[in-house]
Amino acid sequence: MTNETIIAAYQQAKERYAALGIDTDKALNQLEQIHLSLHCWQTDDVTGFEQSGEALSGGIQATGNYPGKARNIDEVRQDIEYVKTLIPGDHRLSLHAIYGDFKGKKVDRDQIEPCHFQSWIDWAKANNMKLDFNSTSFSHPKSGNMTLSHRDQGIRDFWIEHTIRSRKIAEEMGRQLGSPACHNLWIHDGSKDITVDRYLYRSNLKESLDKIFAVKCPNVKDAVECKLFGTGLESFTVGSHEFYMGYAVQNGIMATMDMGHFHPTEEVYDKLSALLLFSKEILLHVSRPVRWDSDHVVILNDSLTMLAQEIVWANALDRVNYGLDYFDASLNRIGAYVIGSRATQKAFLQALLSPIDRLRKAEAEENFFERLALLEEAKGLPWNDVYNYFCLTHNVPVAEGYIAEIHNYEHNVLSKR
C-alpha cells in the first residue's frame, strides 16, 4: 500500500466513526499512551546469563528449537532494538533477575546487585525505553518445589534475600530512568500430590512476603502473581489467586493477572472490574493459553478483545500496567514479538473505537437487542485502517509489511548465529 492509500483509507474510516460519535484522533492519542512491557525472555527461551548450567525448572518450559535464538546479552539487545522498529509507539522492557550483566562470573541469586544491571539501565536510556523487573525463583539448585514457602528457614531466607535484592535493582531502574519499575513476584511453589499442611506453607509465604515488602522501594510498583497449578505441581499451589488477591488488597500492592494462570473456562477480563474496586493498580501478563498455561504467542482472539474492552470501558487505562508474557521457540522469535505486540495494540484500538456511549445507553434502557447489534456491527468497522495509519505515522511497516522485514533480519542476522 502506498502512503496515499493508507491516508485516504484513514480519512474514510474517520468519517465512518464520526457518524457514530467516535473521534479516531482521540483514540490514537490514547493508544499512544499504552506502553507495553516487552518480555526479554522471548529472545532466548528463558535461558538468561547465569553461569550455573541449570536446566529450566519450576514448570517453565520453552518448546521448540527454531534457529537463531539469542546466545548472549548483546544478541538479546540487538533483537529487542530491532523489534522496536516494527512496533508503533514507545514501550518498556521487562527483565528477569537471571538476565544480569554478570560478565562471565558466577553470581548467586542472593548476591545480585544494581551494578549487574547498570549496563541495562544505560542501554535503556540510549534506546528510549523504561525497565521493569522480575525476581527469578525457578531453575536454581535451591528452588526445588518450594522457595519462599519452604519448611527450611535457610531456604526461605535465601529467596527472601534474592527478592529484596531484586526489588532494590528495580528501585535503581525506576530512579535512574524516571519511571517507577514494576517488580513482579512469581514463585512456582506447590506440590504434585495431596498436601495436608497447606496452611503452614501459606503462612510461611505470608511471613516471607512481609519481610520482603518491609524494605521500602519508592520507585517500584510491587506486584504478586498467582497461578492455578504448575507442571509437576498439579495438586497444590501455595500462591493461589485467593492468597495473592487477599495479600495485594490488604497491603496496597498490585495483583498480577496472567491470562494463562486460571482455569481454561475462566476469563481474566471478568476479574478486572472487581479487583479495580479494591486496588489502585494492577499488572497484566498478556499471553495465550492453549488448553492451559502454554504461553503461546498472543493473537487477536476473543479473550484479548474482551480484556481490552473491559479496561477501556472501566476507564482504567491509567490503572493497568501491560506486560507481554509468552515464550514460543517453535517459530521466528522476532516474529513472535511483533505478532503479539501488534495484536495487543489492535485489541485496545478496537476497544477505544467502540460506540461505548450508545452501548451504555442501550444497556441502561434495557434495549438488549440494540446493545448486541451494536457490538456485532462494531466488529466490522474499519478499525484496521486506523491502525495502519497509526503504524504509518510512527514510521513502522504497515499491515503485513513487517513479514518481509523479519525474513530479511532472519537471513542477515539470525541465520548466522
Image (cartoon, rainbow, N blue to C red):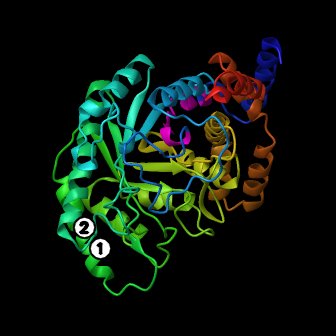
Disc 2 marks a residue whose amino acid type is Lys
Query: Label 2: which residue?
Result: 206
Residue 233 higher or lower than 369, as above or below: below
Residue 289 higher or lower than 327, as above or below: below
Q: Which of 339 and 222 is in front in this view?
A: 339
User: Residue 233, position in %: x, y?
Assistant: 46, 73
The disc placed on residue 167 is none
Location of residue 97 (image quadrant): top left
Disc 1 marks a residue whose amino acid type is Arg
Q: Residue at x 45, y 61 (%)?
A: 274
Name the side, left or right, on which 115 lies relative to 104.
Answer: left
Where disc 2 sits, the SS reads: helix
Label 2 neighbourhood size at 10 Å, few (<14), some (14-19), many (20+)?
some
For the question of whether residue 276 can be seen, the reply is no
- Magenta stretch? 27-42
Query: Label 1: which residue?
Result: 202
The reply to whether dot 2 and dot 1 touch (C-beta < 8 Å) is yes
Q: Nearer the viewer, residue 287 or 347?
A: 287
Name the side, left or right, on which 354 lies relative to 278.
Answer: right
Where disc 1 sits, the SS reads: helix
Location of residue 8 (image quadrant): top right
Q: Which residue is drawn at 61% across and 29% down?
A: 417
For the question of whether residue 101 can be seen, the reply is yes
User: Residue 295, position in %: x, y?
Assistant: 59, 54
The N terminus lies in which quarter of the figure?
top right
Q: Residue at x 29, y 33 (%)?
A: 116
User: Residue 111, position in %: x, y?
Assistant: 22, 44
Q: Residue at x 68, y 40 (%)?
A: 350
User: Residue 41, position in %: x, y?
Assistant: 50, 42
